[in-house]
Every structure is written in structure tokens, then in C-alpha cells.
């Protein structure tokens, strides 16, 4: 395991901000860390890189405890926490020099390598204050990659990026993962995570409410099934009686339900037998957004 | 991992590229000519008024002037003490036939740093030291700095070394610029001019039995050493504020308020004994060298140095304790 | 892509600050040693150091030196000039040459203090040597001690010794500068109103007469009377302390002094 978070809690001013979080990230895995603003996402990430000390629990990076052996543990991590802040009064190259001096075994060749990798060759000797946000983002990533980390932590990397930039970032993340680097990518925008990540954890009010592979989360649960039927009321009455089917909304000519797609053929047969006319049945995998909303709703009700 | 040497290199280069030291240099080159001109006017006025540049007449006249002020009922007693001490010293200079302040580049420099140690030099040190940590916090770079595989105490320690480096350079630059600029007006001589040290002050009495004459370069070297020490102490306290206080302006404001309070206190604390435990009241350690009246009677060089050292040590202690344990939120 | 400036800047700063650091630290240790353990610090003896003497410039012009007590200092004059300052202003207007002014008067000065100063203070002697005009008042504080009860009886006892010292002062002044014009401003009686019998006035004038006698052998010394300037009612010319003249009083004295300095032709320098 590259990263292992074990029952981490944080209390600030008598209030539990993080109430016991555990998850693990394996080699070459792209892990999504999902949650709305204020959910404890950033606090957790800061605990991973020793900016904040957990009240309880422990974090291991490549088997080394961040709390007990921070130097060994952190030498395997590269990170951008929130905005890609660099020293604006220095050039990109001087910034890289700065962070290279804080790690072992980063020579000039490596610096040139990462600059190539993020494609900043042309502007690297300009002052950072003249950089656009996207360029700062790239410099931030270059900085994070300098010391050849095993784990790269990107906190809200898509913030302020245009669609083109987001697409580039996604490809970049995939490329890094292919080279064996594990990534932890946090976001409050699920669509991005969905397209980048292998596994996700969803955090809410300091607790993980779901951890799993994107595939599992998307497919193991009920899917959205849209029934185009007539008469609508009669069909609705029938469907509501079935166990394992939840009718969400009914629109003009369609019923939106949550159910296991495996049940569809049997139900179709039933409805046809009841004289209901079926114009179409559509099975749609839910987006993380929808799933997220449902999880959130559950929280509220629960 | 991340050896201290490289960290110090980082901090030094950062401060340099932030152009803080260059700002100090510019301030110095603006301020020093002003004082040089003022000093030139004083000398010229004296000559214009008295028709002579015989230092003995000037000194004698000064003694008479002080004597008159001592006898005036409107002058506060604390001032009178200072004046009486000055009178005794000036008289001794006349007896020994040694000019206490011939205007030349060396004496000017000497006077300048003597007067600058209470406020001006601490301000210059503050310009650099007060934002060593808080600027990182304001710009957010502290997150990158502390997320690296380097122990926090090493990061702070490297900042202390950088503070020490630039404080030393500020004192040096002040002396160098003072000498170069004032030399244009007063000439570059004066290194070998005799200066008297070793005046001992017991109450209001100046004892001259241990007075020795040294050359002015030796005097300047000693002064520079003492001024430097005071500046380092100010640097330590500024750096602590930089750790404790979130904003750059807030840290500088607190330090500035303390320093200005100090300059006011120095002129009126003789009645308030315990004020001598403030670091601001003890900054001007050069007065023990020239045998002037300390702000609070009974203060001595070892006392002042002890007070300054305790303040600096506590600042260092507090800043390390806080810095190594602090959670970084913003 | 390589930026060599970092290494260069760092090396320069590190090298310079290292030297500066050790120099300043040395200075600090040296200073602490000098102040705390003076006996252990080797220093050269005063005699061994050659005092760099620059040439003393005596500018062309008229130099006024003032000596004595509060009357010459100008105490009581809110403008701070006193008669001496006014004389100086007048001379500056009259003459084309610059007028220099070296004030040495001290509040409360007595003859013994002045005599000692003239004999011992090199700066004062140097100034006197340059003087063209010396303005002085002295003796009042010998005769009447401020704060104590002022009686003619006590003053009379103090008179002989005071005159003796004044004689010595005149001799010293004439010896130090045989060329300068010396104006001694005589005493006046600020207490005329409290002195219906005239005993005090008589005594003051007696003292003034004795001073005049002392001045006779020296042709550079003039005793200038001020007694009549405060008659018959001194009040309008006295400061709030009822003793020192106020601005108007000093103006009167200054007028008398300037009349002595007026050359016969009018436009020639009196010196």
C-alpha cells in the first residue's frame, strides 16, 4: 500500500471535524477524494502531508508513519494543496531550485525533465507572477513530481481550469498512473473524478460515506430505469407494488425508477400481461452526481 | 534529508529575490545624505555663529549651555542628570585635549549608528525579519514548505540563520554607506582619531580613573558589535511575531509600536524602575561605551545584555514551540 | 535552462556575511571586555596617540564673547536674547563684516566660579583670545544670595572678597586679551520700591564705584552704569521674578552699550 489512513480523527476547538477516516491507496491507483466544500476534505489532505496533526489515528505512506517519521514518509509524496502557490517574485526555475534543495537526489537533469513533462520549457525562466493559472498549475505539478514521489496528492486540481485544461490534466493523470505513480485527487466536482479515478472515497461531515471502485459504485447499485409506458397511472401502480423498485418521478410519458436492471425483463413481461403498452425501457448508469445526491439525501433523512 | 545548508541557501536567496535587502539599501542611501546634510549645517552654523572652528571653544560653549540648562527649574530632573554627566565628560575631554566629536566620516558614522540603534536600525531589521514566516503564510507557500520531507524546526532554524545573515549585512551596509556618503562632506579621515572609553558612572558622578584612549576605528568596531547584538535581538523578536501573528502588517505594527514606545520610554522612564526590563529600553548599549547616562539609573552593560539575551532566548523558544506544533489551516 | 545566478548570489552573500558576522562578533566581544573588564584590555596610552590637529580657522570679523551671570545670559527676556543678543544684532546691522557670538554666561555664576573658569577652562581662554568685544556682568550673585533673605548687612560683608576676585578677573582678562574692549555692566537696584531709606541703593552704587576703581588701571575695561536705567520705578522693566530685567529692560541696557560702541564718524567700525 502506498498510502494507508487508519481511523484518523481531528478535533478542533472541542468539535470533531474529522470523525474517523480510513482508506488505502495502492500502487498506480488513481484515487478520488470526493466531498462538498467544508466536508473535511482539505483538512484530511493536510493531515496526509503533516500540515495538520491528527488528534487520533495514524497515516502511513509507503509504510512510514507521517507522524513518527515525517522525513521518510513525506519524501515519497508530492503535493499541491489547494491553489498551486509558488513564490511569485522568483522565476519558475528558481522555484523548482528552491524545492529541489528540500529533497534529496534532485539534480538539474531531473528538473529539466519535469519542466519538459509539464511543457513549461518556454516560460520557465519568467517570473511566476507573470504566469496564468494554468501555468502555475503545471509548475505546481512539476514541483510535486521533482523528487520522484510514489504518491501525488492533487487538491482540487481542476479549480479555475478551462475545459481544455481539464482534459489535459486528465490525460496527464492517466499517464502518471501508467508510470506507477499513485494519485490522490480531491474534488467537489464528481464528473471529473468519475473520468479520472479508479476508486473513490466520498466524505461528508468528516466521515466517509462510501469507498469503492468507480465501477462498483456505478454498477453494483440500482440503476436508473426509465419506462415509457401508457397508461402511466396504471403502470405506476403496478411498479410501486414490486419490491426492489422505487419510483422516483413520473413525467408526461415516462416513469423514472431506481432498480436493479436484472429485474427489467420480468417486469416487462408482467406489464405487458397487464395490458400496459410499452414504448421503451431505458437503463441508465447513474452519474456520480446522482449517486452523490442520493447518498446526501440519505444522510439527511437518516 | 534536506540539509540545513541547503535550507539556509533557500531562505537567503528568497529574501534576496524578494528585494527586501535592496529596499533597506535604498532607504539607507536616502536617509544618510539627509543626516549628513543636517550635520554639515550644524558645523557650518557653529562656525558662522562663533567665527571659529576651534573645538575647544565649541565644547566649552556646549558645557556652558548644559550648565545653564541644569540650573533652569523647567528642565526635568532626569534630563539634568544626563546633562551633568555630559558636562563632566566634556570637561574631561578639554582637560585631556581630545576633541569629542570632530566632524569626519568616521565620527559621523559612529554618531549615526549610535542614534540609529533605538529605532532606525531595528526598523530595517524588521523589514526583513517580520515577514520571514508570515509572508509564507499569506502567500500560501508555507503549505509547500512544510509538506516537504524536512523537519519543521530545520525550516525555522534556516530562517533564523537567514535573519542573522541579513541583520549582519544591514549593520555592515549602514556603516559602509554612512562612511562613504558622509565622507563626501566631511572627508574620509578620522580612523586614527583618539577616543576616550572607560568612563565609569556611579550615580551622577563620572569616574575617569579607568579612562583610556583608543583609536576611533577600535571604537567604531566596538560600537558596531554592540549595535549588531541589539539588532539581532530585535530580529529574533520580529521573527517570533512573524510566527505568532498571521498578517505581515500586524506583525510589523506590533513591533513598530514596541520600538516607538521604547524611544519614548527611554526619555522618561528614570522614575519607573521596572521599565528597565523592557528590551526596547536596553537597545542602546553603546551608551555604556561612551559613559553616558543610562535610561534608568543603575543600569549596566551586563544588565542590558542579560535583558536582551533573555528576550531573544524566549522569542526563539516560543517561536520554535509554536512553529513545530502549529496546524496549518490557511 | 540553467540559471547560474542562484549559485553566484548565494556564494557572494554567504562569503560576505560570514566575514561581517565574525567582524561584528569580534567587535561585540571587544566592547563587552572594554566596558566590563577595562583592566584587561590593552590600549595605547593617551600620550602615544598623536592628536590630529586641524588648523584653527579665525574668520575675519568681530567676535563677541559674553561672560558672567544670568544678566548677560539674558534670563527674564522672553525673546531669549538679553542685552548681549541685542547688541550682537545691532552690531550685525551696523557692520559689513560678520559678527560672531560666543556666549559663556551661566545662570547664578559668581566671581569665584568665573575666575576659576578663566584660569582653567581652555575653551574659554581660546574664545577670549579671539574676542574683540567682551560683555560681562558678575558680582550680583556674590553679594545677594538668591532665595535667602536679602540684606544689605550680609552683602556688605561679602563685598571685599568679591572685589578681590573681580580684580583678579580683570587682570586675567587683560592678560589673556590685551586688545579686546571689555564692557563690565554695573549693578542696578531692582528693589528701589522696597527701599525707602535708600540704604540698598547707596550700597549698590558703592559697589559699582569700587568696581570702577578696579577698572581704572586697564584702559580696555569700561564700567557701564545701569543703575539709572531702572529709576525711578523699575517695575515696567523687570521680568515676573521682579529681579531680572524683561525684554524692555534689556533693550534699555543694550541701548546704552551700543551708544558706547558707536564710532564718532558713524560709519567706521569701532574695532
Image: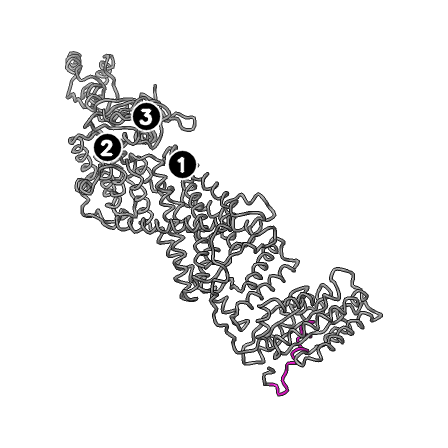
Count of all numbered marks drawn on residues in the image:
3
- Residue of label 1: B320
Crowd around label 2: few <14 · some 14–19 · many ≥20 (10 Å): many
Q: What element carries label 1?
A: helix
In the figure, B255 relative to B215: above or below? above
Residue B122 can be seen in this image: no
Q: Nearest to the eye among marks 3 and 1: give it.
A: 1
Tell me, yes or no, whether the highlighted magenta stretch contains residue A72: no
Q: Which of marks 3 and 2 is nearer the N terminus?
A: 2
Tell me, yes or no, whether the highlighted magenta stretch contains residue C260: yes
Image-based side of C36 in relation to C246, left or right = left
Relative image position of residue A281 (x, y in whole percent): 16, 20
Decide whether the magenta segment is chiefly helix, strand or loop: helix
Relative image position of residue B264 (x, y in whole percent): 54, 51
| The residue stretch that appears in magenta | C249-266
Relative image position of residue A294 (x, y in whole percent): 28, 23
Q: Nearest to the eye among marks 3 and 2: give it.
A: 2
Residue nearest the observer in this picture, C65 or A267: C65
- Residue of label 3: A204
Rounded to the nearest angstrom, the CA distance separating label 3 from label 2 is 23 Å
Q: Mark 2 lies on which chain?
A: A
Residue nearest the observer in this picture, B209 or C132: B209
In the figure, A248 relative to B107: above or below? above
Residue B289 can be seen in this image: yes
Residue nearest the observer in this picture, A186 or C154: C154
Amino acid at each position: 500500500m502506498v498510502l494507508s489512513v487508519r481511523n484518523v480523527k481531528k478535533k478542533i476547538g472541542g468539535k470533531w471535524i474529522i470523525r474517523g477516516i480510513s482508506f488505502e491507496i495502492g500502487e498506480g491507483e488513481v484515487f478520488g477524494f470526493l466531498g462538498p466544500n467544508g466536508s473535511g476534505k482539505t483538512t484530511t489532505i493536510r493531515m496526509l502531508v503533516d500540515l495538520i496533526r491528527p488528534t487520533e489515528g495514524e497515516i502511513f505512506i509507503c509504510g512510514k508513519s507521517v507522524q513518527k517519521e515525517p522525513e521518510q514518509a513525506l519524501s515519497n509524496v508530492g503535493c499541491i494543496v489547494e491553489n498551486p502557490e509558488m513564490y511569485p517574485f522568483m522565476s519558475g526555475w528558481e522555484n523548482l531550485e528552491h524545492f529541489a534543495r528540500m529533497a534529496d537526489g534532485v539534480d538539474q537533469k531531473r528538473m529539466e525533465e519535469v519542466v519538459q513533462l509539464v511543457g513549461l520549457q518556454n516560460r520557465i525562466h519568467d517570473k511566476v507572477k507573470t504566469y496564468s493559472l494554468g501555468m502555475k498549475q503545471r509548475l505546481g505539478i512539476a514541483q510535486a513530481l521533482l523528487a520522484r514521489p510514489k504518491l501525488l496528492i492533487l487538491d482540487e486540481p481542476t479549480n479555475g481550469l478551462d475545459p481544455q485544461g481539464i482534459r489535459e490534466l486528465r490525460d496527464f493523470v492517466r499517464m502518471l498512473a501508467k508510470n506507477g505513480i499513485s494519485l490522490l485527487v480531491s474534488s467537489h466536482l464528481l464528473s471529473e473524478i468519475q473520468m479520472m479515478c479508479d476508486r473513490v472515497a466520498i466524505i461528508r461531515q468528516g466521515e466517509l460515506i462510501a469507498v469503492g471502485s468507480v465501477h462498483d459504485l456505478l454498477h453494483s447499485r440500482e440503476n436508473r430505469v426509465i419506462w415509457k409506458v401508457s397508461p402511466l397511472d396504471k403502470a405506476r401502480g403496478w411498479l410501486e407494488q414490486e419490491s426492489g423498485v422505487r419510483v422516483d418521478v413520473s413525467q408526461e410519458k415516462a416513469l423514472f425508477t431506481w432498480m436493479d436492471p436484472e429485474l427489467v425483463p420480468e417486469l416487462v413481461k408482467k406489464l405487458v400481461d397487464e395490458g400496459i403498452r410499452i414504448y421503451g425501457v431505458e437503463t441508465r448508469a447513474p452519474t456520480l452526481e446522482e449517486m452523490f445526491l442520493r447518498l446526501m439525501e440519505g444522510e439527511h433523512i437518516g | 534529508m534536506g540539509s540545513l545548508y541547503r535550507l539556509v541557501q533557500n531562505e537567503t536567496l528568497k529574501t534576496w529575490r524578494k528585494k527586501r535587502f535592496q529596499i533597506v539599501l535604498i532607504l539607507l542611501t536616502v536617509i544618510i545624505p539627509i543626516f549628513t546634510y543636517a550635520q554639515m549645517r550644524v558645523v557650518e552654523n557653529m562656525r558662522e555663529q562663533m567665527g571659529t572652528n576651534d573645538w575647544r571653544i565649541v565644547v566649552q560653549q556646549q558645557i556652558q549651555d548644559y550648565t545653564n540648562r541644569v540650573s533652569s527649574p523647567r528642565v526635568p530632573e532626569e534630563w539634568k542628570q544626563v546633562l551633568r554627566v555630559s558636562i563632566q565628560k566634556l570637561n574631561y575631554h578639554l582637560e585631556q585635549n581630545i576633541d569629542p566629536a570632530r566632524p569626519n566620516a568616521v565620527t559621523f558614522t559612529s554618531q549615526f549608528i549610535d542614534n540609529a540603534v533605538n529605532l532606525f536600525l531595528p526598523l530595517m531589521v524588521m523589514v526583513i525579519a517580520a515577514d520571514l514566516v508570515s509572508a509564507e503564510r499569506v502567500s500560501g507557500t508555507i503549505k509547500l514548505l512544510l509538506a516537504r520531507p524536512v523537519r519543521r524546526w530545520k525550516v525555522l532554524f534556516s530562517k533564523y540563520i537567514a535573519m542573522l545573515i541579513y541583520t549582519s549585512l544591514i549593520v555592515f551596509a549602514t556603516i559602509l554607506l554612512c562612511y562613504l556618503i558622509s565622507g563626501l562632506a566631511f572627508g574620509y579621515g578620522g580612523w586614527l582619531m583618539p577616543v576616550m572609553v572607560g568612563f565609569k558612572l556611579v550615580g551622577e558622578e563620572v569616574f575617569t580613573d579607568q579612562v583610556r584612549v583608543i583609536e576611533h576605528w577600535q571604537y567604531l568596531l566596538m560600537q558596531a558589535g554592540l549595535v549588531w547584538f541589539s539588532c539581532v535581538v530585535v530580529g529574533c523578536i520580529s521573527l517570533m511575531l512573524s510566527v505568532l501573528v498571521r498578517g505581515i502588517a500586524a506583525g510589523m505594527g506590533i513591533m513598530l509600536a514596541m520600538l516607538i514606545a521604547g524611544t519614548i520610554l527611554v526619555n522618561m522612564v528614570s522614575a519607573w524602575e521596572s521599565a528597565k526590563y523592557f528590551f526596547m529600553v536596553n537597545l542602546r548599549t553603546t551608551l555604556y561605551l561612551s559613559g553616558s547616562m543610562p535610561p534608568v539609573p543603575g543600569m549596566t552593560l551586563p544588565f542590558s545584555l542579560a535583558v536582551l539575551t533573555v528576550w531573544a532566548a524566549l522569542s526563539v523558544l516560543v517561536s520554535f514551540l509554536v512553529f513545530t506544533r502549529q496546524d496549518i489551516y490557511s | 535552462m540553467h540559471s547560474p545566478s542562484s549559485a553566484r548570489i548565494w556564494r557572494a552573500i554567504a562569503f560576505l556575511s560570514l566575514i561581517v558576522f565574525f567582524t561584528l562578533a569580534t567587535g561585540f566581544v571587544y566592547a563587552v571586555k572594554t566596558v566590563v573588564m577595562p583592566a584587561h584590555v590593552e590600549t595605547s596610552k593617551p600620550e602615544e596617540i598623536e592628536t590630529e590637529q586641524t588648523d584653527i580657522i579665525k574668520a575675519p570679523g568681530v567676535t563677541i564673547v559674553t561672560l558672567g551671570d544670568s544678566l548677560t545670559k539674558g534670563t527674564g527676556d522672553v525673546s531669549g536674547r538679553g542685552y548681549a543678543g541685542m547688541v550682537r544684532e545691532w552690531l550685525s546691522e551696523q557692520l559689513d563684516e560678520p559678527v560672531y557670538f560666543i556666549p559663556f554666561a551661566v545662570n547664578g555664576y559668581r566671581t569665584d566660579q568665573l575666575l576659576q573658569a578663566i584660569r582653567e577652562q581652555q575653551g574659554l581662554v581660546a574664545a577670549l583670545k579671539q574676542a574683540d568685544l567682551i560683555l560681562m556682568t558678575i558680582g550680583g550673585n556674590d553679594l545677594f544670595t538668591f532665595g535667602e533673605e536679602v540684606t544689605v548687612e550680609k552683602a556688605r560683608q561679602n563685598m571685599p572678597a568679591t572685589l578681590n576676585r573681580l580684580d583678579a578677573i580683570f587682570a586675567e582678562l587683560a592678560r589673556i586679551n590685551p586688545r579686546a574692549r571689555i564692557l563690565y555692566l554695573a549693578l542696578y537696584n531692582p528693589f528701589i520700591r522696597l527701599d525707602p531709606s535708600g540704604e540698598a541703593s547707596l550700597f549698590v552704587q558703592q559697589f559699582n564705584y569700587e568696581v570702577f576703581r578696579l577698572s581704572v588701571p586697564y584702559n580696555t575695561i569700561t564700567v557701564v552704569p545701569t543703575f539709572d536705567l531702572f529709576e525711578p520705578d523699575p517695575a515696567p522693566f523687570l521680568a515676573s521674578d521682579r529681579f531680572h530685567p524683561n525684554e524692555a529692560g534689556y533693550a534699555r541696557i543694550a541701548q546704552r552699550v551700543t551708544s558706547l560702541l558707536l564710532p564718532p564718524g558713524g560709519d567706521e567700525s569701532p574695532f
